[in-house]
Amino acid sequence: MKRKHALWFAAFIACAVVVYIATRTKDDSLRVPLGVEQAAIVTYSGPLLAVAPYKWGVAVNVRIAEVTEKPDRRIYDLRYIVNRAGTFDLKDYLDADDGSTLEGLPAFKFEGDPKLSKNLDTRIQETEEIRVDVGGRYYESMAMLTLLWIGWLLLLIFWKRPKPPVAPDAGPPPPTLAEMMRSFLAQLEAGTLNADAKAKMEMVMLQCWRNELALNAEPMHTSLDQIASNSSTSEALKKLQHWLHHPSSSVPSAEIAAVIKPYTLEVTS
């Protein structure tokens, strides 16, 4: 009796397994690696297909590589790239070109599998030589363009550049103190020394005494006091001022000429 029950139980288990296998939903999705373009051929007799408008962050990028026209249908060569893991249907990324509803478009499911993409970069490096070739004499062209640019810049800077203005002629140098004193002495001896020339002669004479006593750094009133108190110049200063500022001066012109004459000689350093 126990053996009969065991047989019935085994038969029940076998039937359950057969029913499960027969009734389970078959997974017909295709597993593809992420980031690698795939191809799919879709035959459709409805309206002309177009790729759905792109949206930021879309899981699948789709493009139509080629469309083959047949009398009763069109054959589409579709290319797609899966961007993240998950199960997707290619028809969800297609629209009718005229905006109508797509009826009867076959499903094309696939699964983005990150496991297949794990060593993809390594496989690409093993099968492809990674290099960048720059053709067309790129570096020679860039060197030539650089030289042309520098030459053009130099032309802009220097070609037909106006010359700097010539410095104006300074004219003859001003007369020295000795030259002016010689002129005053000549006028004094000729009797043509007027009031204006006398005033200028006094200023030049004071400057000669300042140079003689090294008083150029002193103000004029201080210099005048030191000239008047110095034994070598005090007497000459008194004679000059009395002769210049007193019309009835008893100082003869000969004495003034004697005061002037030593300063008509150029001082050499």
Image (tube, rainbow, N blue to C red):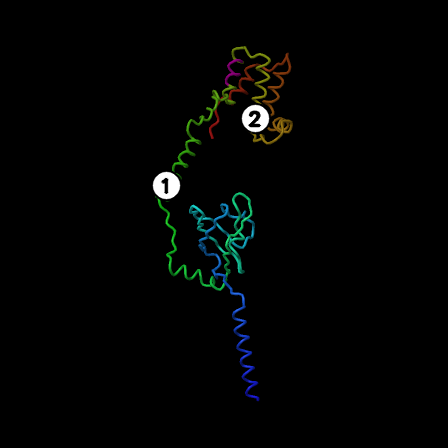
Q: Quadrant of residue 125?
A: bottom left
Q: Is residue 57 magenta?
A: no
Q: Residue at x 56, y 17 (%)?
A: 256
Secondary structure character of the magenta stretch overall: helix
Q: Residue at x 51, y 16 (%)?
A: 183
- Name the kind of residue labelled 2 in the image: Trp
Q: How many marks?
A: 2
Q: Residue at x 38, y 61 (%)?
A: 126
The one nearer the camera, 239 or 87, is: 87
Q: Which stretch is magenta? A: 182-187
- Please give the residue where the numbered disc 1 appears in the rendered image: 141
Give the Cα distance between marks 2 and 1.
78 Å
Task: Name the front one of labels 2 and 1.
Answer: 1
The one nearer the camera, 260 or 164, is: 164
Q: Secondary structure at mark 1?
A: helix
Q: Residue at x 46, y 48 (%)?
A: 64
Q: Position of residue 108 (x, y in %)?
A: 49, 56
Q: Quadrant of residue 8?
A: bottom right
Q: Position of residue 47 (x, y in %)?
A: 50, 46
Horizontal side of 158 relative to 226 (left or right) equals left
Q: Eyeballing the image, is 131 above or below 209?
A: below
The one nearer the camera, 31 or 159, is: 31
- Please give the residue where the numbered disc 2 appears in the rendered image: 209
Disc 1 packing (10 Å; few <14; some 14–19; many ≥20)? few
